[in-house]
Image (cartoon, helix red, strand yellow):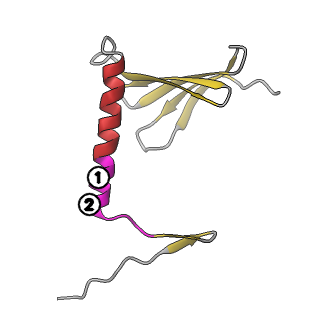
Amino acid sequence: MPKKTKPKAVYHEDTPLTPITAKERRKLDKLIKKKYDRFRRRYPEVHGKVVDFITHSIEGATLYFTVRFKDKTDFSLRYACGMFGVGADFCDFKTGDFEMIREYMRPIPR
């Protein structure tokens, strides 16, 4: 029976990063599922249709509004201070990254 070895750490700048274990991955997946379930309860009238859930948040002086669809695509709007639109795009979220499908409104240079 081969001896189990500890995963090697890789460094990003000065920070050591080690691969996560299967147990940690299951824990993260459970937390993400719980978070998405909370989003689905926020607007129950849209869940179960074409829309999976809707989120909104404020970071800095920007309001973010996101609609996640059942096919794992994502439509988001961003509003800057003064409530004028600064961007709208349609993204694919299947891979875990926001892959841009179409940009409807380009950000306004400041």
* In the depicted structure, whether residue 33 falls above or below residue 38: below
Residue at image location 24% in from the left, 88% down from the top: 3
Q: Which residue is mark 1?
A: 27
Q: Is residue 102 or residue 16 the one in the foreground? A: 16
**Relative to residue 11, is residue 36 drawn left or right?**
left
Which image quadrant is residue 82 in?
A: top right
Q: Residues within 10 Å of mark 1 (few under 14, many from 20)?
A: few
Residue at image location 33% in from the left, 28% down from the top: 38
Please, what is the three-letter code of the amino acid marked with disc 1? Answer: Lys
Residue 77 horizontal/vertical position (percent): 58, 21
Residue at image location 39% in from the left, 24% down from the top: 69
Q: Is residue 85 magenta?
A: no
Q: Is residue 26 magenta?
A: yes
* In the depicted structure, whether residue 61 falls above or below residue 29: above
Location of the C terminus by quadrant is top right
Disc marking residue 23: 2
Q: Secondary structure at mark 2?
A: helix
**Relative to residue 6, is residue 23 drawn left or right?**
left
Residue 4 makes an appearance in the image? yes
Q: Is residue 20 or residue 48 the one in the foreground? A: 20
Which image quadrant is residue 58 in?
A: top right
User: Where are the magenta residues, as a range?
Assistant: 18-29
Residue 66 horizontal/vertical position (percent): 49, 24
From the image, give the main secondary structure of the stretch colored magenta.
Answer: helix
Figure label count: 2
Please, what is the three-letter code of the amino acid marked with disc 2? Answer: Lys
Q: Secondary structure at mark 1?
A: helix
Residue 61 horizontal/vertical position (percent): 68, 26
